[in-house]
Image (tube, rainbow, N blue to C red):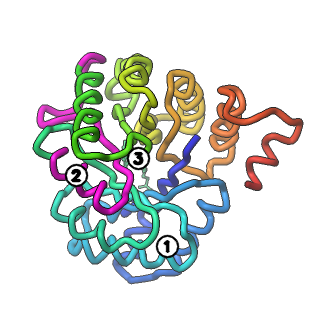
Amino acid sequence: MYVIGELINGMFSNVKKAIQEKDGQIIQELAKAQEQAGAWALDVNVGPASRDAVGAMLWLVENIRKVSDIPVAIDNAKWDIMQEVIPQVPGEKIINSSKADEDLLDKYVPLAAVNNASLIGLTLDQAGVPNDVDKRVELAAAILTKCAEHGLDVGKLFIDPIILPINVAPQQADNVLCSLEQMKMLHDPAPHFLLGLSNLSQNCANRSLINRVYLAMARGSGLDAAIMDPLDSELMDVAITTDLLCGATIYCDSFLEAARSK
Ligand code: THG
């Protein structure tokens, strides 16, 4: 499971405060802790309230790069911000994200290709998050088509079928699993499939349990990447164990320890 650590997000009060007070130490510690816990990449989001989003994003990346060289996923919904930030990000980078509207893909896919970045494509368009499986699959196909058209390697593409909170949209969790089953057959080799796992359990009781069980279910349907909390060690153990059970790693009695100390 390609784990993208979610903790450097202005949605969290400690990160919001760090951005406001330019306290780089907190960001560096969050980067180190997540990498140490097994994250393969780090999501970076300035949060909703940031005034100078470009400056704040570059400041976060600068602090991460002082302690870590794993890929950073630049998480912002605005094209102007993404376009300005991406060329200035040192090291490996992921564009998080583009919607599946054709005119947007015609900008985002070339931005990824030119900057040697990976791209997360959301299966949603102007009309919002689809309520059904068919529309998600249709939008995934549109994303794949645009990547072929603009020469972005399918290995650099993550398709995100969008998971919503289970207490708000109870049917969507199953729709996403069905979508994954179908989307993985659209292209050979398949792109990566990713979810923002914690969305699922927002404002729910037993958050970690919900995240853990769904991660295993989604892995079974073809998910191979997740933006999630790598410091939730029980959740990380599920991620590691799904790798074993899907044949991505080989069993040994110490498979958890081996994976944790990668
Ligand atoms: N897809 C993609 N990118 C994404 C998402 C996605 N980026 C953002 C988000 N969704 C994934 N990251 C988070 C980070 C935190 C939480 C959920 C998703 C979260 N935060 C606490 C909450 O809301 O309860 C905040 C608690 C606090 O304020 O301290 O759950 O789907 N491509």
Looking at mark 1, is its residue's CB closer than 8 Å to ligand 1? no
The residue identified by callout 3 is 156
Going from N to C along the chain, the mark reached first, 1 or 3, is: 1
Q: Looking at the rendering, in which quadrant would you find the N terminus?
A: top right
For mark 2, does the 10 Å Cα neighbourhood hold few (<14), some (14 to 19), or many (20 or more) residues?
A: many
Seen at 68% across and 39% down, the residue is 240
Within 10 Å of disc 1 (Cα), the crowding (few <14, some 14-19, many 20+) is many
User: Residue at left 37%, top 78%?
Assistant: 59
With respect to residue 111, does 194 lie above or below? above
For the question of whether residue 203 can be seen, the reply is no
Question: For the residues carrying marks 1 and 3, which lies nearer the camera in this image?
Answer: 3
Whether disc 2's CB lies below 8 Å from ligand 1 is answered no
- Position of 104 with respect to 214 (left or right) is left
* Secondary structure of residue under mark 3: helix
**Sequence-wise, which precedes: disc 1 or disc 2?**
1
Residue 40 image position (x, y, % from top left)? 57, 54
Q: CA distance from mark 3 to mark 2?
A: 13 Å
Q: Relative to residue 196, is residue 164 depicted above or below?
A: above
Q: Is residue 11 left or right of residue 233?
A: left
- In front: 152, or 71? 152
Please give the residue where the numbered disc 2 appears in the rendered image: 108
Of the numbered discs in the image, which one, if any, rests on residue 169? none
Q: Name the mark on residue 64.
A: 1
Image quadrant assignment for residue 53: bottom left
CA separation in Å, label 1 and label 3:
22 Å
Can you say which quadrant of the picture contains the C terminus?
bottom right
Magenta-colored span? 105-134
As helix, strand or loop, the secondary structure at mark 2 comes to helix
CA separation in Å, label 1 and label 2: 24 Å
Q: Three-letter amino acid code at disc 2?
A: Tyr
Q: Secondary structure at mark 1?
A: helix
Q: Quadrant of residue 105?
A: top left
